[in-house]
Image (cartoon, rainbow, N blue to C red):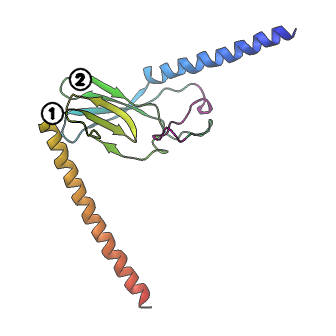
Amino acid sequence: MNSNKAVVAILIVLGGVVLFQASEWWERAYATFKSSELSPDGCIRIDTYEPFWITPSIFHRIPHPDPEVRHDLGMVWDAAVFSRAYEAKTGHFLGETVVYDPVASFNLMLWNASREPGRRVVLENGFPLVDSDRCADKATLAKLEVFYEKEREENRLRQETWEKERKASQLTDSGR
């Protein structure tokens, strides 16, 4: 009698493991296209998808860009997504992120995080997406540097404006 209960318990656990592994496959296989984005240099296209979920969110982990940080199971996912990267001209597949909740991660796209010459590393929301030597030629990376320089200048101007406004509000607050 007890052995029958043990066999049933083992079958339930094994069934759950098989269902979870299958869900990892069908989430990506039957995903719905959400959006597409081109890199600033026009070399990489990133397609974002919503995974096809059948199993409840309690069975999905929420990955974190920092592998040292752990999340509890059962947290609610607001809008899980994953992304695939392709070379824009040839359509060559370059990489794919894990399924993650963009609400829980930081919204940042780094189009080249590599310090190694001839290498291109793309991070989306802190998750690795591309690590390739494609689109890593000097001319393409120079276009990216121009993009980042323009972005740094815009951020510098925003910060200067913010500092001026903050100082002006402190002067008005101290004059009261």
Indicate the position of residue 41 as horizontal and vertical percent values.
18, 39
Residue 63 is a magenta residue: yes
Is 38 left or right of 61, judged from the image as shown?
left
Residue under circle 2? 91
Q: Amino acid at mark 2?
A: Gly
Residue under the point 62% across and 35% down: 73
Indicate the position of residue 25 as horizontal and vertical percent values.
48, 19
Residue under circle 1? 137
Q: Is residue 145 above or below residue 174?
A: above
Residue under the point 33% across and 72% down: 163
Magenta-colored span: 55-69
Mark 1 element type: loop
Which image quarter is the C terminus in?
A: bottom left
Indicate the position of residue 152 as horizontal and vertical percent values.
24, 56
Residue 119 is a magenta residue: no
Disc with the residue nearer the chain's start (2 vs 1) = 2
Q: Nearer the viewer, residue 80 or 113?
A: 113
Magenta residues: mostly which secondary structure?
loop
Q: Is residue 153 above or below residue 62?
A: below
User: How dense is the environment of label 1, judged by Cα within 10 Å: few (below 14), some, or many (20 and up)?
Assistant: few
Which image quarter is the N terminus in?
A: top right
Q: CA distance from mark 2 to mark 1?
A: 18 Å
Q: Nearer the viewer, residue 93 or 138?
A: 138
Residue under the point 31% across and 31% down: 130
Q: Amino acid at mark 1?
A: Asp
Q: Residue furthest left?
A: 139
